[in-house]
């Protein structure tokens, strides 16, 4: 939305915005996000995932109304802080909820769709700003501001029909409720389904292991936990610095330097870019589980690097000219950039931390992940616009250069996790799975004997889950 609003003359003239104040209005979103990161993970662990989603939606709705009613920069910035807080709170809670609740064989696809819906919102925002461009007066920017709150309203209306996370329920000692949720999402409510009982036993074993008073701190000191946190942090960092924030929030300036100077045309390109990226990200979501997150990250980062070099070279060559094929080629380069980001980084961005972090640190780890995103967002929203003004086309080449380093780190350090339940991922990082039950995939392939069924039946009777 801010990318489109920064193009609107009604918005920039009403607030008398310079490059610095434009950056401030955008960066305050991330300041609010940093605030949410300080304690929202703890709250969602204590009160539940649905509770966290509800209050995140309420905060976002209130903030959208305040932004729409803003009469000066300070009020607008305060609203952006609240929107950043509410949005980041939902980002901390949402992926954790999906990772813990979705069926194991649909988890990667479902988590990939979570970030795809950023572009549903982006498309609505771009379309709204394009349509409101023709509105005289302040409603040209107040209307897009108000539309932000609609998603929070939809969330509140849907929450009563959504189950709580079964892993959170097990951690709270509400095992029968957790078993019912697992049966509901995996087997149409059949609590005697073998795969449901197998997953339930894995969850109970793993969370029981993590509940040891010393286990959280011990696991934070071990190599496997550190590797999870480093991959999570670098996922957040790389997603922000591969060029997406730079391109999306400064699309107007980038198009101007490419030779597209008409504000109406820039808004139209912004709508087309959002629509195209949504289509690409949906396609990427369907292939993420087949490719794996590491391969998707490498493919996406490689494409982004090539795209930045293309945009930089074409901007240098044709940015100051009226040669239309050169201008069109530069715009095509921007679309190639968005294609690369949408196909890989968008589907895996929240999938990686939500899947790799174990339950005890999942919400807190999502807070750390969001903090890295927000801190990087604050820096990049002030640094990139100034750098673009001073360096021009050279900035694209510099950004492409450090993307090569990101590509090398992903290839060397990241771990592939496709085809595993959350509990089975432990073996990839720790060298041991914290349950003596077989892997779900091994059961489906028929490469293990059926004695685990009798062990689960005995265990469930002992703890009263068969009653």
Image (spheres, rainbow, N blue to C red):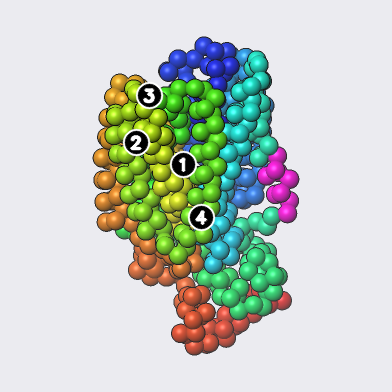
Number of numbered tags placed on the structure image: 4
Ranked by sequence position, the earlier of labels 1 and 2 is 2
Ranked by sequence position, the earlier of labels 1 and 4 is 4
- The answer, for residue 167, to whether it is visible in the render is no
Mark closer to the observer (3, 2): 3
Cα distance between the residues tagged 1 and 2: 29 Å
Label 1: which residue?
370
- Circle 3: element type: loop
Label 2: which residue?
311
Label 3: which residue?
322
Chain part drawn in magenta: 153-161
| Nearer to me, 73 or 453 | 73
Residue 210 appears at what percent x and percent y? 47, 61
Residue 236 appears at what percent x and percent y? 41, 44
Cα distance between the residues tagged 1 and 4: 25 Å
Q: Residues within 10 Å of mark 4 (few under 14, many from 20)?
A: some
Cα distance between the residues tagged 3 and 4: 35 Å
| Nearer to me, 282 or 323 | 323
Residue 443 appears at what percent x and percent y? 51, 80
Residue at (40%, 42%) from the top-left corner? 337
Mark closer to the observer (2, 4): 2
- Magenta segment, principal secondary structure? helix
Label for residue 283?
4
């Amino acid at each position: 939305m801010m990318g489109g609003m920064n193009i609107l003359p009604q918005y920039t003239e009403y607030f008398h915005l310079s490059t610095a104040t434009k950056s401030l209005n955008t960066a305050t979103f991330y300041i609010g996000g940093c605030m949410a990161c300080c304690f929202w993970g703890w709250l969602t662990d204590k009160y539940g995932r649905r509770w966290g989603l509800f209050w995140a939606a309420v905060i976002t709705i209130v903030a959208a109304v305040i932004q729409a009613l803003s009469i000066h920069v300070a009020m607008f910035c305060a609203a952006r802080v609240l929107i950043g807080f509410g949005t980041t709170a939902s980002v901390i809670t949402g992926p954790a909820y999906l990772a813990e609740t979705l069926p194991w064989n649909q988890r990667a696809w479902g988590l990939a769709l979570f970030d795809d819906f950023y572009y549903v919102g982006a498309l609505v925002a771009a379309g709204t700003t394009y349509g409101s461009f023709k509105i005289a007066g302040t409603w040209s920017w107040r209307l897009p501001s108000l539309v932000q709150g609609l998603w929070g309203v939809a969330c509140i209306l849907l929450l009563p029909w959504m189950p709580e996370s079964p892993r959170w329920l097990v951690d709270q000692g509400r095992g029968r409720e957790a078993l019912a949720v697992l049966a509901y999402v995996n087997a149409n409510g059949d609590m005697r389904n073998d795969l449901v009982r197998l997953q339930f036993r894995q969850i109970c074993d793993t969370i029981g292991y993590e509940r040891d008073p010393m286990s959280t701190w011990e696991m934070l000191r071990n190599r496997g936990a550190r590797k999870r946190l480093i991959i999570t942090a670098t996922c957040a960092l790389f997603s922000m610095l591969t060029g997406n924030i730079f391109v999306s929030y400064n699309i107007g300036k980038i198009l101007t330097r490419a030779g597209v100077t008409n504000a109406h045309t820039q808004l139209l390109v912004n709508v087309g870019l959002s629509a195209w990226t949504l289509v690409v990200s949906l396609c990427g979501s369907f292939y993420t589980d087949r490719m794996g997150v590491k391969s998707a990250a490498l493919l996406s980062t490689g494409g982004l690097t090539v795209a930045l070099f293309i945009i930089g070279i074409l901007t240098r060559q044709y940015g100051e000219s009226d040669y239309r094929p050169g201008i069109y080629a530069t715009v095509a380069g921007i679309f190639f950039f968005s294609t690369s980001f949408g196909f890989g980084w968008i589907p895996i961005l929240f999938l990686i931390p939500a899947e790799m972090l174990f339950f005890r640190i999942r919400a807190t780890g999502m807070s750390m992940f969001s903090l890295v995103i927000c801190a990087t967002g604050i820096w990049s929203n002030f640094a990139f616009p100034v750098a673009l003004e001073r360096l021009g086309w050279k900035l694209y080449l510099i950004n492409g250069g450090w993307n090569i380093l990101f590509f090398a780190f992903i290839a060397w350090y990241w771990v592939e996790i496709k085809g595993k339940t959350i509990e089975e991922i432990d073996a990839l990082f720790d060298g041991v799975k914290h349950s003596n039950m077989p892997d779900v995939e091994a059961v489906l392939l028929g490469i293990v004997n059926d004695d685990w069924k009798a062990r689960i039946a005995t265990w469930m009777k002992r703890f009263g889950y068969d009653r």
